[in-house]
Amino acid sequence: MSVLELIIALPLLAALAIWLGAPARAASMGATLINLILVFVTTIQYAGKTGLAFTQSRPILDNPSLSFAVGADGVSLILALLTTLVMLAAIWQIQDRPAIFYISSLLIGGGALGAFLATDVFFIYAFHELALIPTFLMIALHGRADAAQRKAVAWKATIYLGAGSLVLLAGLVWLVLEFSGGSKLTFDLEALRAQAALTPLPIAKQGQIFFVLLLGFGSLVSLFPFHSWAAPAYATAPTPVAMLHSGVLKKFGLYGLIRIAMPLLPQGVHVEWVQNALLLMLLGNILVMGLVTIHANRLDDTLANSSVMHMGYIFLGIAAGSEVALKGAVILMFAHGVSIALLFGLCGRMRNQLGTLEYSKLGGLATHAPAFTVLFAFGAFASIGLPGLTNFAGEVMIFAGSFTNFKAAALSNLHWTVFLALWGVVMSAVYMLRAYRGIFHGNATTGLFMTDPAVSQRVPFILLATTLLVTGCCPWLLLNLMKSAL
Amino acid sequence: MITLGHYLVVSGMLFALGLAGVIARRNIIIVYMCLEMMLSAANLALVGFSRFHLVNGLPDYTAQSLVFFTITVAAAEVAVGLAIIVALFRSKQSVDVESVTKLQG
Amino acid sequence: MSVFTIEAGLALLGLALLLVEAFKPDISRSTLGLTAIAGTVLALVLLVFANHDSASLPSFIQPWHQLDTLALFYKGFALVITLLVLWLTLECAPYLSRYTVDGKLAEMFSLPLIVCAGMMWMASARDLVTVFVALELVTVSFYVLVAFARKSALSLEAGVKYLILGALSTGILVYGIAWIYGATGTMSFDGIAKALANPATSKTAALFGAAMLLCGLGFKVAAAPFHMWVPDVYQGAPTPVTAFLSVGSKAAGFVVLTRALDAFLAEGSIIAVEVQSLLLVVGSLTVLLGSLPAMFQTSVKRLLAYSSISHAGYLLLALACRESARFDLSSGGIVAFYLATYLPMTVLGFLVLGLMRANGLGEDIKDFAGLAKRNPTLALLMTISFASLAGLPLTAGFIGKLFVFLGLVDHGYWGALSCAVIAAAAGFYYYFKTVLAMYTTEGTDTSALTISTASKAVAGVLAALILILGVYPKPLQQVLSSDQAGVVAK
Amino acid sequence: MNASILLLLPFFSALLILLGHRQLKGAAVLISVGSSIIAFLASIAFLGADDNEGTKMLLPFIDVAGFRAGIDVMSDKQSQGMMFIVTFIGMLVHLFSLGYMKDDEAKPRFFGSLSLFMFSMTGIVLAGNLFMMFIFWELVGLSSYLLIGHWYEKASAAEACKKAFLTNRIGDFGFMIGILLLFGLNNGDVAFDNLQDAFVQGGPLHDAAKLHPGLITAAALCIFMGAVGKSAQFPLHVWLPDAMEGPTPVSALIHAATMVAAGVYMIVRMSFIVTASPLAAEIIAGIGCFTALLAALMATQQNDIKRVLAYSTLSQLGYMVMAVGAVAMAAQHGHAEHGPDPGHAAMFHLYTHAFFKAMLFLGSGAVIYACHHEQDIWKMGGLRKHMPVTFWTFAIGTLALMGLPPLSGFWSKEAVLGTAYDSGCRPLFLAGALTAVLTSFYMMRLLIVAFFGKPRSDSAHHATEVPMIMLLPLAVLALFSIFSAFDILATPLQAMKPPHVEGHDTVLFASLAALIIGAGSAIYLYRGKDKDPVNIKLFANKFYFDEMYAVIVRVCQDRLAWIVTALERVFVDGLVARLPTAIIARLGAATRMLQGGHLQGYTFLLGGGVIAVIYLVVFVLPHMGH
């Protein structure tokens, strides 16, 4: 039995135990803490290795051959680390809520862990879906808006993600069929990779399959123009769900592209029409959603839209497709996950305490809640891309990675996109500072009143902020996990 | 000379008449009769085909055995069907097809 | 002991139960029910240990009867669904008896046995005569079962509709058989396959016959555009009968369809291309016509009816993907696999529905409101059932869909694939609408619901089956591919 | 070793204080001041370090195949000299702040931010490659944000810090593009020394300059854009005057002496690329000159003591930038070489300017402190008598800035004007000279109005000399303002003093004439006046740049955001989400109509279906030609 199986099973078992009557907070906190330690230890054990480790495979179907196969490399461990961190924070910050909050958080987290640690395409896909269901249910059940509105929001997300994952399934099936050589159908990623290395597909076909996968994975990651579910869903979702989905689960689509699409279809993204389409779409994410975010006048709207916008940068890394850019994309996935979870966590707390998140009604909170302000600043400046916090490392790697093949010294569409994307960095500073100014700066007597959380309630946020700082100042800690080429 | 074609034309006409009746008539009993007519059309076709499909100089009786089964089944259907239609009449005082439109959508 | 004996015995037991009730009216329904259940269980056990060799059959029956993996699988399938239906009937008996003449339910226990025998025969059919007879045995019995709750206007209406449309389809089926016979000069599937491989056979006549035959069978399996009866009949019929129709009747239809298509699409068949295209068109149409209207349903039972149509569409698409090169399973095997996963999820859905009825609740979505509060177990079971019907991964329903998708992509049937995707997306909507209702809306009544331990156990087994098949489908695959006759496995 | 102390000490000090200042309380101040003193001592040791030590890696930061962004320490004359300025003035400002911020409640936070600034600025100075420079570039932006927004409860301060950060971000946008272009052109190596090497014959950048001169010009201008933002050059100059909302010691350190000079520092570091592109050199010189003149004009009509100094800073920064461009132009035209390094004049002016401008700001801080936070010079007056020490130091600073020989400002200003003269571009020189006139004018105006005449308000009347801890830095800086240009100081401090060029009589004459004309007219106009006799609205309102930008932001950003949001809702969401769902829903409703419940309808459909199927199978499909 691989330790990874234990890591995947632990949250799911804890959820089951809570459903059967175990004390919710103790069980979920315990399971998550143990899981964090397990993942941490596993990561440390992995350090210095290359390729997949801790593998284990249990066949569940012969031909097409499916197996419950797990395995981890640097990329999946970084994401597993992200998952357990955000899970702990999300569960920790739950206060006075029914057991279903804990159960759904555990299921979302467990599903995400499964998706990141499985190495069989079937289970990668399946675990993601497992995690989606509680997300929808929680938005519909315990969302912030009134019943009709939150249901509408949940529906939108359900149908969008449902349709997206069906397109994805079609794409994956196509992929599997193309690579299965003639004789035996397999969903095992390693086998597929071996086959792809042996007999690569014709480039035009790589482009077609890549595009289908891009649409499927992309709509799970709110790739423009398939993004309109995301902002309302995050703005409405209960805090732990918003933290977990935007922070962790949404990374699945990107993980899939990096883990499945890129290695199997190495030329796919470089097919001209595919790359141009992707560049256009991600510019939509960055520029259009950047402007939409600037227009927002409530914190939850700002955060939700910004989370859509920042996906554009990760897609840029994928579009660039170089080693540096892809590793940068992984770093940015981690960074964005931690920072947005931090921000959503704090945002949820503000909403509970203040009842409103409109900038016009807030102001001067820095005076009353200094610790809260500092924590928020970590998240806000991280998402602006300030050096010293992790996001910067990811972004700069993506930008640089787009220029590693500047051989002809001619500016291609990719490079122009990078320039425009850089303008997006300015825009994100505009809206984040506007939010920061509106909430924390200004006269303390005009805004609503809020105090700092108790020390024990700060822990989850401190955990996330520290992560941002440590990995931001020392990004090589994460990079050392990705020694092998992507 | 009466060929297979003649039988088939008659059978086809019977079938079409039956189908038209099923579609057009409003009285369930008559609809039911039309259905029986369609079965008869099939039987005629079967017998026709059987008669003209010679195996070792003799007609092939497999198809004709099916005719017997069809007749039996039709009888069974009529037995059950009439019972149901009677029950319908009892409860609605009508055997019009429009008396059963509650289930819809 | 030969398998044929089991079937005959089952039919005899059904007859016997009818007679017993007729001559001894005061016999309690639980006695009848339990006898029938015991008979089915016994048949199931015997089936497992019976001689599975075609040679063991009585020689006079051998030309019409075959025992291959597929046949044996469907026989077992028929027995299991009959068993579940009988048990569900017993569970629903108290409220069902309110709608029957004199409160009698005897036929509800005896007829399923006869239906079961019919389905078992059908599974083994080697020629069209047997198919027709067995099919009619099932259909006529179903006329009675559907209209059984005569005091309920809906049940009666369903009975009438099923009767007229069923008889119409029978007419079309027989006419089709006649023309196939006319074109090929034989009734047996092997012979048809052989004749169709002969270029001298009249293509037009064969196509005409095949089209009619497929229309008739399409009616039985609820293929569009012959599916209109399904929502009305499913909704009006007593819940156990609906479950039986939805699983048993459909499975029977598909086994026949599989056999017929094996003949029509055999190597070198002159009509293969047309039939296959027809299947694709009909399958695509069926998934859409099943899924799209389902989005607007307010009755869970009717919703399940549409869902059943939609699933029939997926099954048809699976059949359309012949020669799906690279799996162990043939398209017939995939259909069998799909139906095996379809059984627990559908029955579980109807079981919950039946238990709700037994507790005096309706069948509308609004009756499910707040169910999670009133009985979390029931709500969870329903969720599992619907998740599987929607085809979510890690449930049995997903594996079936995965096979269909694999087949469609493999053949490059992009149009059909997009229809399937749209239908599945719409499916997410309507299944979750119900699930959401259970968890969100507070019902007007919040009193706890009680369900018997036995129900819980059966439902639990079904739910476990859904989940286990979802993550470990290998045993089922092995059953279906350990084949001697080479029909299922390639 | 030295470098790591210089870099890490303030880092840990900042981290400790910013995250734990409420637990640390008073200790925070001690940590910060202590670290600044140690950093100063370390920088003296650093001054003595070997010039040719080159670049050394300190930390790998990011190091993957094809991309390296390490923390590399560059040790040369330029970084050593700059490091001294930063730590020296930094230390003095720390000390001054002990007095100035004595009563501030958030003193620990202030000192924490100061430490953060020291850390970031050290990083810029030591940076050995462009990525490291960018990292710290952003971090000084953050510390500047925190310090300008120190009194965030005041709306104006909150807006000012936001404005500063965002304006800098626009500059950084260009900076990053420039970095990426060079990164691409030089095959992924952006270490300064390697870049410079790449420009020699046969290097990749040399080739690129031949083949794609446009790209090199674009890269140069984009890099320069970073400097435009940080050094507040036109058109991104608007943030600096607003930044005066921060505490005055901050203005002295960050917005006068060091951070704003970072742009100049960087462009001097990259001057080889400016030299490589004639167009870029002209644009840079032009923008510097334009900024110098523009800001000087604005300064003549400001009434806030800090704003006068702020515009003066803008103007002097413009000088420095102009010098870089002008030297490059001169080199391209084949005129006289100004020593081996084309950045000498700019760096030299940066060096002298840092001392006297920091001193002026600290002096203004002392005045403001004494006048109970009164900043309007027309409400001061007669302070000469109340605050003699402050007056004398302030006067020295003013004269140094005006360029009175032999104070330090004279030498550096002459060097700058010399470069403009050498560039061969006459307007450049004339505008530079005109700026010098204006500089003398507004500084003399400031001195007269604030320190001479009668007190014009109660607070000015009751002003008293500030405490010793604040006077000490003033005195030290006054000494440097006088003597820093002399070789006795300039040589050990690694100031990049350009060698004196003979034959620049025109320049000498022009600068002296400017001094006399400017000062004379100011004395004539302002002696004994109680209110401003000159009233030029255009200058007082800073050429309406703020208003113009407000309109641009409103139209190009807020209105555009509104439109885009609406379009996104209507079209994107509509086309991608609502339309397909509506179509499917409509289809669903339509198909549901088929299910009307009428038996005849069903039989009709069934019969029709059969006919359709037969038609399809028998008549259509066989003729489709598969």
Image: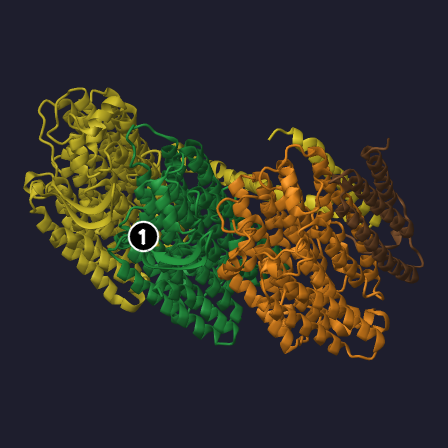
Drawn side of residue D432 relative to residue A158, left or right: left
Question: Percent position (x, y) of residue D510?
Answer: 18, 25
At mark 1, the secondary structure is: helix
Palette colour of chain B = brown
Q: Is residue D526 above or below residue A38?
A: above
Q: Return the residue nearer the eye: C42 or A35.
A: C42
Q: Return the residue nearer the eye: D164 or C465.
A: C465
Q: The yellow chain is which one?
A: D
Question: Percent position (x, y) of residue B95?
Answer: 91, 54
Say which quarter of the image contains residue C415: top right
Q: Which chain is orange?
A: C
Residue at 70 percent across and 51 percent down: it is C222
In the picture of the structure, the residue carrying the numbered disc 1 is D147
Q: In this view, does A19 lie above or below C74?
A: below
**Residue type marked 1:** Leu
**Colouring scheme applied when the structure was drawn:** by chain
**What is the chain letter for disc 1?**
D
Can residue C401 be seen here?
yes
Given the current orientation, which residue lies at the most extreme right position?
Answer: B93
Residue at 44 percent across and 67 percent down: it is A11
Palette colour of chain A = green
Total residue callouts:
1
Question: Percent position (x, y) of residue D319?
Answer: 23, 32
Tell me the quarter of the image containing the N terminus of chain C: bottom right
Drawn side of residue C4 relative to residue A481, left or right: right
Question: Percent position (x, y) of residue C367?
Answer: 71, 65
Q: How crowded is mark 1: few (under 14 residues within 10 Å), some or many (20 or more)?
A: many
Can residue D430 be seen here?
no
Q: Return the residue nearer the eye: C475 or D208.
A: C475
Drawn side of residue D242 relative to residue A294, left or right: left
